[in-house]
Amino acid sequence: MKQHLFIIVTIVIGFSSFMLGYSLPPFLEVGFGGGAGADMAGGVTGEAELRQQFEELYRDVEEQERGQ
Amino acid sequence: MIIAVSVAKGRARIADPKGKQEEGLMEIAVPKKNIIWAYTIVGGFGLISVITLAMHEYYIYLSAYLWFGFIYGMCLQYGRFCFASAFRDLFAVGVPRMVVGIMIATLLFAITSNLVAATGWSTFHAAPVSFHSAIAGLIFGIGMVFAGGCASGSLYKTGEGNGTSFLVILSISVTQALFVDWGGILNRFVPASWHESALQKGLPDSINVGDGWVDQYLAGYVWNQPVKTYARSLGMQDDTLTGAMLGNAFAGVFIPAVIILTIVYIFWVRKNYVRKLKVEKGGDATLRDHLAGFRDMVMASKRTSIAGLFLGIACGLQMFVIEGLRMKFGVKNAGTLLERLGHDFGISAKGTVFDPGYWYVTTQEAQWVGWVLQKLGMNNMDNIYFGWVNGIPSPAINPADWMSVALIGGAAVMALLHGEFKFKAPTRELAFWAILGGFFMGIGSRLALGCNVGAFFVRTAMGDMSGWLFGLGMIGGAFIGVKIFNWYTERQMAKELAGLDFEL
């Protein structure tokens, strides 16, 4: 049983490592630490800010429609 | 007790299930068909990953969810990671092992996930904090005791072939999908202030925010609440090493976890430990003895703690992988990828689908049912939950759904390899409790914006203040659930005994 579990764990680690390797290049370009992720994401750090951006977008659209 | 054994690789072994549970590493032999099934499941997932990657590079995003879901399933099954069992064991029979294990796991998870947060690449977003989290936790706690499994526990038990757990999952899913869209008579219970506030949020016309209790609760109440983490409250940033490790992990998790563990030791462990010590050594227990007793209590939950550590590592890695893939493909949400692939059905009004980037359980299950109801002609895209935030993409291309299905698969593989897989159909009584418990968990999950994983385990570990509020409510709910359940079973037993005829 342990041998089979070991093989399966190896397969799982293999696939997961492939995913990790696949996603690594962008990090190497941008660098780790200091909230780099937030900057890279275009300054949108959270759901609340994303929501606010969309609220502003829809408000602008509504105002434009009203203006027409 | 000896379990039935067939021959694997020509060698027969016997095993005591109790010993196996304790040791974890004891060699056991399992039926050969179990091994074939385990490889078939892993092979199936592997094939899906390879074939979809060959179809288009973007599908690797879904495969990332799949493989991390698989790891979560393996960890959950190995650690028997179930919040319902934990609190039921504690309150009903005074066994603290699983509660202690979950606390240790939360602590270990906090260390790994906050390390990720410190790099600035975490996909986690804190939730609004107010007493609604505690109320939601209370409802959820009652439900999980009724159902005999929490949201994550029911998923891994489904992987073990447990039909009752599958019913629980189904009940949670249906309840959530209907609850988020339910207006009608429920609109009467919406305070006017919520209604007004919800209308002022400027949501698009496609979202009927003035109709539906959950919509008005979300836009009119929850969104108005502050988002707080321990780090920010202490004047630090979540994405710095000091803020993440000192503010969120130490102040937000370590200190409360030690307090809870101390309470568990004092009320549930100390008495027996002192009695045992008196028999073995004689005399009163010293502070040193109590510290040794505390250590023994923590060490007794090794299996759950190890599962928690690997869950934490996997969750942290998943955050890295998902964020890296988002950058690579130039997207902020999987909805954009699905649209680029031509799957535009069920994408939310703002172009998103549910894409947490870490371990999550209940929303994707609600999406299964939401998608089916939409296909059957019900409009499920005019509410905030589906129509504005999470969408209802086809389960076949829903990233978080891949995670849940793989989680069940991972748990199945572990159960098969440990000889613990067995199809168990629910009895009528168990089915009743499963549906009732799932109903309460579904309501609690939507009120808290997450379940025992999304609203407690992950949020607590990441220093989100709403996590402990949900946790306290959940503990209270579990206590009430155990009391109700005990009352019911005692009543049933009394009835059955009264119906027996004794001939003297």
Image (tube, grey):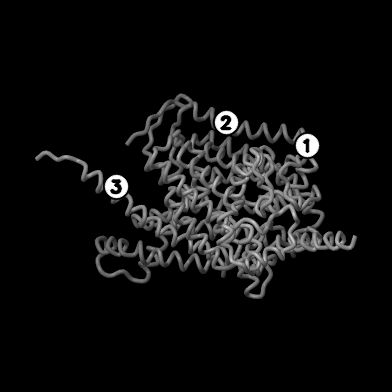
Looking at the image, which residue sits at the far top?
A: B10
User: Which three-letter amino acid code belongs to the residue tagged 3?
Assistant: Gln
Q: Nearer the viewer, residue B318 or B156?
A: B156
Q: Of the residues tagged 3 and 1, which is closer to the observer?
A: 3
The alpha-carbon separation of the residues under discs 1 and 2 comes to 26 Å
- Chain ID at mark 2: B
Q: Of the residues tagged 1 and 2, which is closer to the observer?
A: 1
User: Which three-letter amino acid code belongs to the residue tagged 2?
Assistant: Tyr
Give coordinates of residue B136: x percent, y percent. 52, 60
Give coordinates of residue B19: x percent, y percent. 38, 43
> Would you say B407 lies left or right of B280 here?
right
Q: Mark 2 — residue?
A: B39
User: Which three-letter amino acid code belongs to the residue tagged 1?
Assistant: His
> Would you say B204 lies left or right of B19 here?
right
Would residue B474 be visible to someone looking at this image? yes
Vertical placement of residue A62 versus B179, above or below: below
- Chain ID at mark 3: B
The alpha-carbon separation of the residues under discs 2 and 3 comes to 44 Å
Image quadrant containing the C terminus of chain B: top left
Q: Of the residues tagged 2 and 3, which is closer to the observer?
A: 3
Would residue B246 be visible to someone looking at this image? no
User: Which circle marks residue B492 in the picture?
Assistant: 3
Pointers 3 and 1 in contact (CB under 8 A)?
no
Mark 1: few/some/many CA within 10 Å (<14, 14-19, 20+): few
User: Which circle marks residue B56 in the picture?
Assistant: 1
Pointers 1 and 2 in contact (CB under 8 A)?
no
Looking at the image, which residue sits at the far left?
A: B504
